[in-house]
Amino acid sequence: MSDAAPADSPGPHPKREIDLGAMPERARYGLLTSVVVPRPIAWVSSLDADGVPNLAPHSYFMILSTDPPILGFVSVGEKDTLRNIRETGDYVINIAGEHLIEALNLSSADFPSRESEFAWAGLTPEPSRHVRAPAVAEAAVALECRLREVVPYGNTPNYLIVGDVAHLRLAEAVVRDGRVAADLLRAVGRHGGPVYSRTADLFTLERPRYADMAARRPDGDS
Ligand SMILES: Cc1cc2nc3c(=O)[nH]c(=O)nc-3n(C[C@H](O)[C@H](O)[C@H](O)COP(=O)(O)O)c2cc1C
């Protein structure tokens, strides 16, 4: 426990200044992955050139565009997922509910390329509509993606894998009133090290509009 005042107590707080560039890479990785949180997890299924299915979680993951729908995730170095996607040109991003977290974690182990994480994790490859890579049948969300480009970054290097979403498949069980309900999907967030968060204690907050705020401004003209 830190003996500093809690982060949500009234500030200002004593701060620590950190020069990321002067740190060893491992410590920098630890800090960045502890502050860019909670990260959604792309559970990426792909096929190798011989048709062996592969599955691995990637939490460097985000929406790059919705028109057209484009998603990006990062391979930290060269891995089976990246190699498969380069070879075949497609993959599926599955979103795991909390009940699948053990299987998701297991699929991150350093399996030899020829071993399928599907079999090890007791998961079922489900045929996709528009791509050759299978989805995880047990996961509620499958985003079928076609590779657009691979962009290298940094010294490792890392590879940003950018793909167009060709199709979305949703389990009926997570849909309420035509929308995906967060309390039904129960997605998991990644924090630093082995720390995860549940989708629990949800709340809603409407986005403010400047025009409304200006109209109510105590010292305003109106
Ligand atoms: C929750 C979680 C998130 C992860 N996120 C990433 C990531 O964003 N990028 C990455 O390269 N590896 C990430 N990993 C590690 C990979 O899953 C791991 O290296 C895996 O063995 C890669 O499998 P592959 O060689 O079959 O592609 C993550 C692991 C876990 C458990």
Image: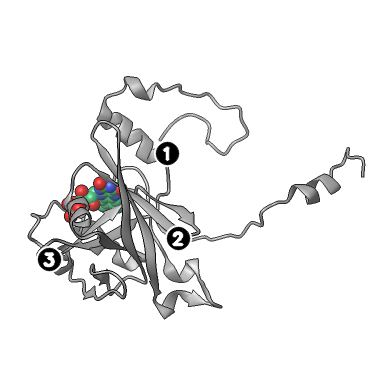
Mark 1–mark 3 distance (CA, rounded to whole Å): 36 Å
Q: Which mark is residue 197?
A: none
Kindly identify which residue carries mark 1. 35
The residue closer to the viewer here, 45 or 22, is 45
Mark 2–mark 3 distance (CA, rounded to whole Å): 33 Å
Kindly identify which residue carries mark 2. 199
Kind of residue sitting beneath label 3: Val
Instruction: Kindly tell me whether residue 94 is visible in this rendering.
Output: no
Query: Which residue is most to the bottom?
Result: 172
Q: Residue at x 53, y 31 (%)?
A: 5
Q: Check the image and report above or below for 215 versus 51.
A: above
Mark 2–mark 1 distance (CA, rounded to whole Å): 18 Å
Pinpoint residue 207: horizontal percent, then vertical percent.
66, 54
First of labels 2, 1 by sequence position: 1
Q: Residues within 10 Å of mark 3 (few under 14, many from 20)?
A: some
Q: Residue at x 48, y 76 (%)?
A: 175
- Residue 6 vs residue 75: left or right? right
Kindly identify which residue carries mark 3. 52
Q: Quadrant of the C terminus?
A: top right
- Residue 176 vs residue 111: left or right? right
Instruction: Kindly tell me whether residue 50 is visible in this rendering.
Output: yes
Q: How many marks?
A: 3
